[in-house]
Amino acid sequence: MLSRDESELIMRLFKGLPAVSVLKWSTFLIAIVFAFLIVNASVRWITVRVRTSETATCIDHLRSIDAAKQQWFLEGGRQPPDPLRDEVVTSNSIPTWEILSIYGGVEWTGGQGWRPYKCPAGGVYTLGRVADLPTCSITNHFLSWK
């Protein structure tokens, strides 16, 4: 409820205006406030959805990269272009993007062909050792050993 002073202030502001005009302006102001609140809530909701989608896509890329690293390790770490080359691969070995392109870990871009995954939020992926999970430079984009 309004205090007596607030009521008197409002009455002085609208003194001399017809009651219909006061109702029109107050309705207009209320509509403007509601419109602002709806737009603000919509923008925040869309922003959260985009960030959630980017995070999920990044984590899916990290899973694919890790699966490609593990497949490379399980098959003995054969290197292109000579798939019969024998090389000792340990959990400390670090594959390259070229190697992972054989086992997955890359995406098709149409006219540009195959390329390493890119984080949709602009992060940079680090492959690391076979024993380690791949990482993204964005703070909350990560895999865990669940």
Image (tube, rainbow, N blue to C red):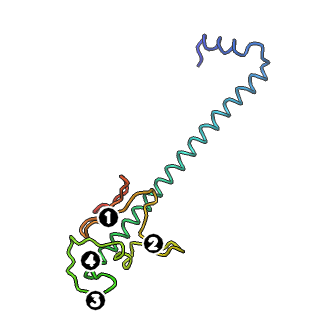
Q: Circle 4 sits on which residue? A: 73
Using the numbered discs, state the Cα–Cα distance from disc 1 to disc 2 in whole angstroms: 16 Å
The kind of secondary structure element at disc 2 is strand
Residue 18 found in image quarter: top right
- Residue at left 53%, top 45%? 44
When asked about the image quadrant of residue 67, the answer is bottom left
Q: CA distance from mark 4 to mark 1?
A: 14 Å
Left or right? Give the position of 117 relative to 11. left
Which callout, 1 or 3, points to the residue nearer the camera?
3
First reached walking from the N terminus: tag 1 or tag 2: 2
**Mark carried by residue 134:** 1
Q: Residue at x 63, y 33 (%)?
A: 33
Q: Are marks 3 and 4 in contact (CB under 8 Å)?
A: no
Which residue is most to the bottom? Answer: 84
Q: Which residue is mark 2?
A: 107
Label 4 element class = helix
Q: Nearer the viewer, residue 70 or 129?
A: 129
Q: Please, what secondary structure does the residue beneath circle 1 have?
A: loop
Q: Is residue 141 left or right of residue 51?
A: left
Question: In this image, 78 relative to 102: left or right?
Answer: left
Q: Nearer the viewer, residue 145 or 137?
A: 137
Say which amino acid is labelled 3: Leu
- Lower position in the chain sequence, tag 3 or tag 2: 3
Looking at the image, is mark 2 or mark 4 earlier in the sequence? 4
Q: Earlier in the sequence, mark 3 or mark 4?
A: 4
The residue that mark 3 highlights is: 84
